[in-house]
Amino acid sequence: METKTHYRNIAKSDHLGVADLEDFNEKNIPLVFTIKEVKQELKVKVAGRTGDFNIAYFIQNIIDEKGQKVNVKPLVLNVTNAKIVSTFNPTKENPKGSPFVEDWSNTKIQLYIDPNVKMKGEVVGGVRINPMQPKEAIKKPFTEANFEPAKKANATIEMIKKSYSLTPEMEEKYLEYVA
């Protein structure tokens, strides 16, 4: 498969953009992330201009071209995306969602590329947050009853973790079992 280079890669951004999401899509990296925290950052340079921005930082890491774990770039939350995140965080005081960025930690979001996003009257495409919050799939625990079928399937720890929840103790027991 031929690797192609997006024209936007020449000016690497410190924040998530369309080129990053296209790269994730090519590598089959799911676009579901968990917000670690949102910071209101003042006088920050974003896309060549300095301003005040709400910036979401993520818990997840990805594997880079060198096989190293790196943090997912932070996402600058424009008004549209910030409104969506706020609806994912209802509180007793705000049942329709919390407008306070401090309440947005540990919020799961799904990103997508919206080709119709406009900037300065020109359609340029942009990163959007899906207004339907992704649901956490509850995984069955991996137990000793799963050892033999997993061994027969030559299942790696990574493969098991995709389908099961795996405690460090059970992981250690399974590795001893297959050794």
Image (cartoon, rainbow, N blue to C red):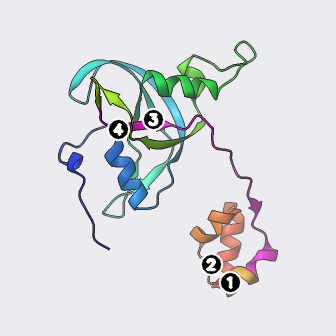
Which quadrant of the figure has residue 171? bottom right
How far apart are labels 3 and 4 at the CA level?
22 Å
Residue at the extreme left of the image, as rendered: 10
State the separation of the CA atoms marked 3 and 1: 38 Å
Mark earlier in primary sequence (1, 4): 4
Q: Are marks 1 and 4 in contact (CB under 8 Å)?
A: no
Query: Label 3, on which residue?
Result: 57
Residue at the extreme top = 93
Which mark identifies residue 155? Answer: 2
Q: Residues within 10 Å of mark 1 (few under 14, many from 20)?
A: some
Considering only vertical position in the picture, is 65 above or below 8? below
As displayed, is residue 63 above or below residue 90?
below
Q: Amino acid at mark 3?
A: Tyr
* Distance of label 2 from label 4 (alpha carbons): 40 Å
Q: Residue at x 52, y 35 (%)?
A: 36
Q: In this rendering, would 89 be left or right of 11?
A: right
The crowding category of the residue bearing disc 4, from other C-alpha atoms within 10 Å (few below 14, some 14 to 19, many at least 20), is some
Q: Are marks 3 and 4 in contact (CB under 8 Å)?
A: no
Whether label 1 touches label 2, CB < 8 Å: yes
Q: Residue at x 37, y 37 (%)?
A: 126
Residue 38: x, y in percent?
Answer: 48, 27
In terms of sequence position, does the residue under pointer 2 or pointer 4 come before the other? 4
Residue in view at x 29 percent, y 38 percent: 14
| Magenta region includes residue 144 | yes
Q: Name the residue carrying label 1.
A: 151
Which element type, helix, strand or loop, lies under badge 2? Answer: loop
Identify the residue position indicated by label 4 in the image: 125
Expressed as whole percent of the image width and height from the top left, the position of residue 158 reads: 57, 68
Q: Nearer the viewer, mark 3 or mark 4?
A: 4
User: For the residue carrying disc 3, how many other residues have a C-alpha within 10 Å: few (<14), some (14-19), or many (20+)?
Assistant: many
